[in-house]
Amino acid sequence: MDSDGTQEARGTHANPVPRPAGPPEMPAAPPNGSTVPPRPTRAPGVPPMPDGSSFLTWLRTPRPEAPPGVWRFGHRPRPAEEPERTPGRQLVSGALIAFLVGWLIWSLLWNGYLGSWWLLPLYAMIPESWAEPHSFTAVVVVYAYYTLIALVIMVGVGRLGRWGEIWRRYGPPAWRRSVPEHQRPPAPPEDPAEWPALRAAGAVDVAERLAADARAGLMRDVDHARIARAWQGVRSGRHSLATFSGAVLKDGAAACLHPSGARDLPSRLARHDLLTGQVRLGTSADDPRNPYAYRGTGLALGPELLGTSLLAVGPAGSGKTGTVVRPLAESLCLHALAGRAAVVVVGAAGAGLGPVDAYDVVVRIGNQESEYDLDLYGGTGDPDEAAAVLAEALVGDLADPHPGSDSRRSTTVLAQLLGPFRAVHGRFPSVPELRQLLDGAPGPLAALRQGLQDAGQESLLRELDARERQMGQPGDVGGVLADRVALLDRPAFASFFDTSGTTRPFTLKALDHPVRVRIDLPERGHADASRMLARLVLAQFTASVAVREDRSLFACLLLDDATGVVTPEAVRGIQRLRSGNAGVVLTLRTLDDVPRPLRGPLLGATGCRMALAGLTPWDGQDFAEVWGKEWTEARDVTDRQIIAETPAGKAAHMLRRVITGKAPTARAVTVRQVERERWSASELAHAVPAGHAVLSLTDVKGEHAPPLLVDLRG
């Protein structure tokens, strides 16, 4: 049985999209001939194989509910407000003074300076026969009474000096808290390894088979997530219980496999928790600007947060690809193997977006060895839809950047040519053919007209007549479109974007299935073409996810460099993704790569926003505006000089001034509530340490987290 959404992904011509064959990329050997230890294939917290106990420990670890962005694996919730904490110096000095006071009281009692009244209870309680001097009984009773009085004094001064807090802060309890792995949280009330949901539904034999595989070390975290996803399909009615049970009883933990047959990725660099769907990116810094509940906790993202889209801005070298895009791509590929997600990763060739074996489809545009091609028209058969997507890719960046503008004129021009061409040839034009039509070459237009006349397509003839009348007139966008198409009509792309059916084009219509796709753009020497292709993929993605049949499958597009991609139509498309269970991840070196009128709408359309270290102040100003202000407590301290009125007071003040060098003053503290920016532009530009970022989060349910200072190296 196929798990929910794990059918074969098919392209424009119903060609299956198998997992590409090819050896994984191997690192080069060191020049000095020394052996390099192999890269670990699993991060800490990921259940290894075949030790079943490690998998069961991972599975049984509690994952309590937490605010958005908190790494829930083994998380210990903290109070929402920071408890009042006495400074260590004040705490130690108070404890020492309390000890000295207790010692003084005991010394005064012992030496009789306070009288003998404190011995009256002793004399009243013991019989006279025990009071014989120097007897053993008298010595024991008297010294026991002395010990009791000393303990009473010690308890009193200990509570006064807060000795208990010193013990908890600096004693063995604090040492044990510094090693959290020695303190394991309690296990969940129901053992998830026994599959209680299956048992409650009557599938006891299926639960027993899965539990046995887990104990024997035959189950991975991906297997658990994949079978849980298939069980959701049974609960929703997409699959039958008999088919599911038969598949599990036959194959056990290997049931309901992904079409590629893979049960894990070749390697993992980040920490993943497929039970919650999270990937850990770093650690929330223990900084006063972070809410107390987040300080020191792991920072993680999952589909519930990526469903609102993510925008990461930071200069080159700030870690956008290595610490943000690569872990997210790895996590979504694992979700795809579990039948939960479809992912498309777009970046420059050699950008380090993961090995080839981690993807089902790798499209290397401009590389003649690429096994797959990219469908220029998005796999649609509607000329108007194809024209809209292609116009956005070709001239979307030339449209008026104000949010209300669009590229309808370019769409109309393309539709006037794509519709007649498809009616005559049964396919859309290739790149050279489209360029000739947009240039107004008489031969192709005449042949197209003759074909329409022979077919009796009167309505399409009128479309072609309108296109010929507009050619050469002022304001015609056909020449601009032809110039942009010419960027793709290059020898490097000669074997790409074929529409004859001889190649294997990939289309984003395949996002109905849990497919893993990587598209390498030809950055070197073809920067303009790369930006145009990135706009094409984004436009096709937003158009495809809106018409998906199975929206329970999360779809995500990761665009490693969104320079020149953000257009008015792209912003509108990103705003519609949340309702379609989809999201995008965009990275930018600077917000200057986005037209000024679109910066506010872009920041408003993305629910998760990240400002990495090295941001410019003018970029920080945009983030500061979108994050807004908050009420905070401001303390104003005023020192007022004390004026002595008596001769003795003046003499004391003069002596104090000679000793301290300062005039005697009285300090006045004023506390008031003021509204200040959560993070100012100056703080974002100069107060974010290297390897850190400020990240705000919003999930698909509307819950949000304020801007957090995150250590991406943790």
Image (cartoon, rainbow, N blue to C red):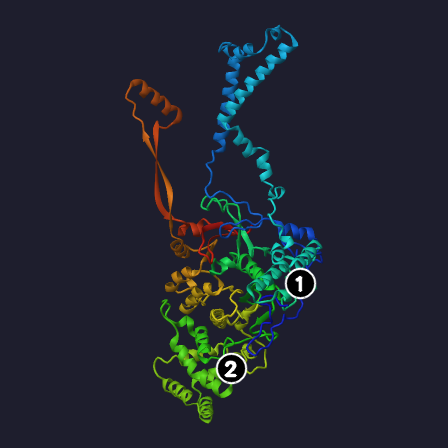
Q: Amino acid at mark 2?
A: Ser
Find residue 652 and report its horizontal and vertical position in percent: 35, 20
Residue reaching furthest left? 645
Q: Quadrant of the N terminus?
A: bottom right
Secondary structure found at label 2: loop
Find residue 148 and report its horizontal and vertical position in percent: 57, 18
Residue 156 lies left or right of residue 369; in this view the side is left
Is residue 521 something one can see in this rendering? no
Find residue 298 and report its horizontal and vertical position in percent: 54, 49
Q: To which residue does mark 2 refer? A: 430
At 51% from the left and 66% from the top, the residue drawn is 551
Mark 1 and mark 2 lie on one chain; the one further toward the N terminus is 1
Q: Amino acid at mark 1?
A: Val
Is residue 272 something one can see in this rendering? yes
Task: From this view, report whether residue 119 is shown above or below residue 34.
Answer: above
At 58% from the left and 17% from the top, the residue drawn is 147
Judging depth in this view, the residue of 222 and 129 nearest the camera is 129
Q: CA distance from mark 1 to mark 2?
A: 47 Å
At 44% from the left and 89% from the top, the residue drawn is 445
Q: What is the crowding at mark 1: few (fewer than 14 residues within 10 Å), some, or many (at least 20)?
A: many
Q: To which residue does mark 1 refer? A: 248
Secondary structure found at label 1: helix
